[in-house]
């Protein structure tokens, strides 16, 4: 997760320095992978706790660390969106938590196509 978060951060900085809208646009897809890793990691942590292999305090601390890595990816996405706006004038839709829920299903996979309440397909 740390390496993936670092790649996202580096891509965000490079897209800004190089005025590269394509690289900035790719950051969101890279973040989806990091989000999936975080979800899998947290699930594994709590399964290990349930099996008695790690203490609850350790499980919670590991989950928090995973969340911090995931937040680095979210911040990289924000930088990428701002870079795209500066270069192209593109504005992302802001559907917040609903957009996040639609991005992944119970297996951590990206859904094929679902529509948002206003009828727009998900990105």
Image: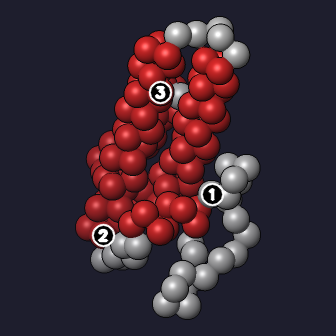
Secondary structure under badge 1?
A: loop
6 versus 99 height, above or below = above
CA separation in Å, label 3 and label 2: 33 Å
Location of mark 3 (residue): 63
| Numbered disc in front, either 1 or 2 | 1
Among the 4 quarters of the image, the one containing residue 60: top left
What residue occupies the far left of the structure in this picture?
Answer: 86
Among the 4 quarters of the image, the one containing residue 93: bottom left
CA separation in Å, label 1 and label 2: 25 Å
Crowding at label 3, few (<14), some or many (≥20) Cα neighbours within 10 Å?
some
22 versus 18 height, above or below = below
Q: Earlier in the sequence, mark 3 or mark 1?
A: 3
**Residue at 56% of width from left, 72% of height from top?**
123
Q: Earlier in the sequence, mark 1 or mark 2?
A: 2
**Residue at 55% of width from left, 91% of height from top?**
119
75 versus 120 height, above or below = above
- On the image, the x and y values in percent for residue 10 come to 40, 36
Kindly identify which numbered label has been placed on residue 120. Answer: none
- Tags 1 and 2 touching, CB below 8 Å: no
- On the image, the x and y values in percent for residue 101 come to 54, 62
- On the image, the x and y values in percent for residue 61 come to 42, 19
């Amino acid at each position: 997760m740390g390496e993936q978060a670092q790649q996202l951060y580096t891509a965000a900085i490079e897209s800004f320095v190089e005025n590269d809208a394509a690289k900035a646009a790719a950051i969101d897809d890279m973040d989806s992978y990091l989000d999936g890793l975080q979800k899998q990691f947290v699930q594994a942590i709590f399964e290990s706790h349930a099996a008695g292999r790690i203490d609850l305090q350790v499980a919670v601390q590991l989950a928090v660390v995973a969340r911090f890595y995931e937040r680095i990816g979210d911040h990289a996405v924000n930088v990428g969106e701002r870079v795209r706006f500066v270069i192209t004038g593109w504005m992302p839709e802001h559907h917040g938590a609903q957009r996040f829920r639609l991005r992944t299903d119970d297996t951590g996979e990206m859904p094929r196509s679902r529509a948002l309440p206003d009828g727009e397909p998900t990105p």
